[in-house]
Amino acid sequence: MRQSVNRWIRTSGAFDGVVDFDSALRDSTHPARIAPSLERGDHLHPNDEGYAAMTAAIDLKLFTSPPRRGQR
């Protein structure tokens, strides 16, 4: 279910922008898991490196771009 929701969020066009933390933290060999180097050992919560990866995934232009049509 999580993968289906994430796919919709990424591809639906329903949002002005998306910060994809799933993609930033995922284990490339096991995409349903957080990369071992980025989690605290509980397979659920990021460690300091994971939070740094999440921070790096944020495109700051999302906060400085002009509003899209119909928005102020």
Image (spheres, helix red, strand yellow):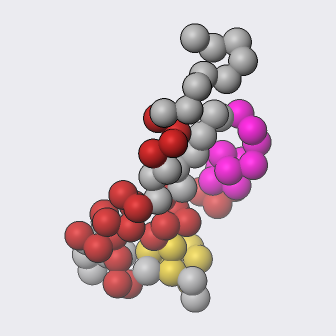
Q: Position of residue 4 (x, y in %)?
A: 69, 55
Name the side, left or right, on which 29 lies relative to 35: right
Q: Position of residue 53 (x, y in %)?
A: 38, 67
At a point 27% along the width and 80% down the height, the residue shown is: 41
The residue positioned 75% from the left and 38% from the top of the image is: 13
- Can residue 19 be seen from the camera position used here? yes
Looking at the image, residue 67 lies above or below residue 4 = above
Name the residue nearer the viewer: 32 or 59. Answer: 59
Q: Is residue 1 visible?
A: no
Q: Which residues are magenta?
A: 5-14
Residue 56 in percent (x, y) is at 41, 61
Q: Is residue 23 magenta?
A: no
Whether residue 29 is situated above or below residue 54 in the rendered picture: below
Q: Position of residue 1 (x, y in %)?
A: 64, 56
Say which of 38 and 58 sits in front.
58
- Farthest residue toward the bottom? 29
Q: Where, by quadrant of the figure, is residue 55 drawn?
A: bottom left
Which quarter of the picture shows residue 40? bottom left
The kind of secondary structure the magenta stretch mainly shows is helix
Image quadrant in which you'd find residue 69? top right
Query: Which of 61/39 is in front?
Result: 61
- Is residue 38 found left or right of 6 in the rendered image? left
Report the residue at 45% width, 52% height from top. Answer: 58
Is 7 magenta? The answer is yes
Q: Residue at x 57, y 45 (%)?
A: 18
Give the vertical position of 59 relative to 12 (above or below): below
Which quadrant, please, contains the C terminus? Answer: top right
- Label tally: 0
